Image (spheres, rainbow, N blue to C red):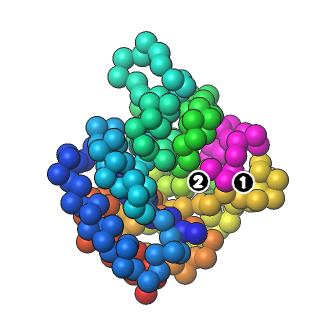
Amino acid sequence: MRYFIGNWKMFGVPKSVNILNKINSFHTKDKNRKKYRVIITPPYTLIQTYAKSFKNKKIYIGSQNCYQKEQFSSNTAAISPYMIKSVGAKYTLVGHSDNRGEGDTDTMLKNKVHFALKNNLKVVFCIGENKSDKKNKKTFSVLKKQLTKVLDKKFDKNNLIIAYEPIWSIGTGKIPTKDELEKTIIYIKKILKKIFKKKSPAVLYGGSVDGDNVKLFKEINEIDGFLVGGASKSSKKFIDIIKNYYR
Ligand code: PEP
């Protein structure tokens, strides 16, 4: 199973559902539809209505983040995994670099993953090195730390997906070389196999994925799918990624 996840970030109002309708009608007719799953993470404000609209369809709705406490608390504007699950989301991102940049620590991330899984949300855990890590050849040590500090062998690996998103690639149009990316995904899977006793969760790539460069990524068999930001806000661009991946 491969995954195409669209992360809308701070984008979307109720009528933006037409983007999902178009993706859904493409998916329904696509001869490859059984080979992949489409997940969209709209902002919190749209989760409930979209989850309802697509309840019996093959598009899954997720959250872009969750708070590090389980149910209810006195933290203003916080949204817990329990609350997200209660409005029909099936997935949540955790550890997106935008949120790490706003202060998410490894301890907070561990709590988020733990409480999300406990509330039956599947977790897409994001990791990735920044530009200076890459320049200083610290990519592998940074990724190892991000994985080992947060992921616990007791977490259910079947409900966990890892998204490798180099920060220098997000929204910049810059992508790793095929060789670099292949080595990095293999390394991430090696660490995951150590944590989870031989079996690695799915590992996705994210960072400026579009309908053109996906042709290069599809040559790397170890990549189990993609986390797409910018291009997921257009049904055509998102569908092109899927089409060109299977072409
Ligand atoms: C993202 O925000 O997770 C992302 C991958 O963005 P983009 O595709 O725009 O680089």
What is the quadrant of residue 152 in the picture?
top right
Q: Which residue occupies the foreground of this view, 131 or 223?
A: 223
Query: Does mark 2 have its CB less than 8 Å from ligand 1?
Result: no
Q: Examine the structure image and report whether residue 145 is included in the region drawn in magenta.
A: yes
Query: Does mark 1 have its CB less than 8 Å from ligand 1?
Result: no
Indicate left or right for 227 with 68 as reference.
Answer: left
- Which residue is at a point 21% across and 60% down the rendered structure image? 18
Q: Is residue 84 above or below residue 159?
A: above
- Which residue is at a point 38% across and 72% down the rendered structure image? 27
The amino acid type found where label 1 is placed reads Leu
Residue 83, position as x, y percentages in the image: 44, 30
Q: Residues within 10 Å of mark 2 (few under 14, many from 20)?
A: many
Q: Residue furthest bottom?
A: 247
Q: Residues within 10 Å of mark 1 (few under 14, many from 20)?
A: many
Disc number at residue 192? Answer: 1
Q: Examine the structure image and report whether residue 187 is included in the region drawn in magenta.
A: no
- Which residue is at a point 49% across and 47% down the rendered structure image? 91
Q: Which residues are magenta?
A: 141-159
Residues marked 1 and 2 touching at CB (< 8 Å) = yes
Residue 99, position as x, y percentages in the image: 43, 37
Q: Is residue 33 above or below residue 165?
A: below
Read off the residue under disc 2: 162
Q: Residue furthest front?
A: 56
Residue 103 makes an appearance in the image: no
- Which residue is at a point 58% across and 76% down the rendered structure image? 220
Residue 9, position as x, y percentages in the image: 32, 46
Q: CA distance from mark 1 to mark 2?
A: 9 Å
Indicate left or right for 106 with 209 as reference.
Answer: right
The secondary structure that dominates the magenta segment is helix
Q: Which residue occupies the foreground of this view, 96 or 142?
A: 96
Numbered marks: total: 2
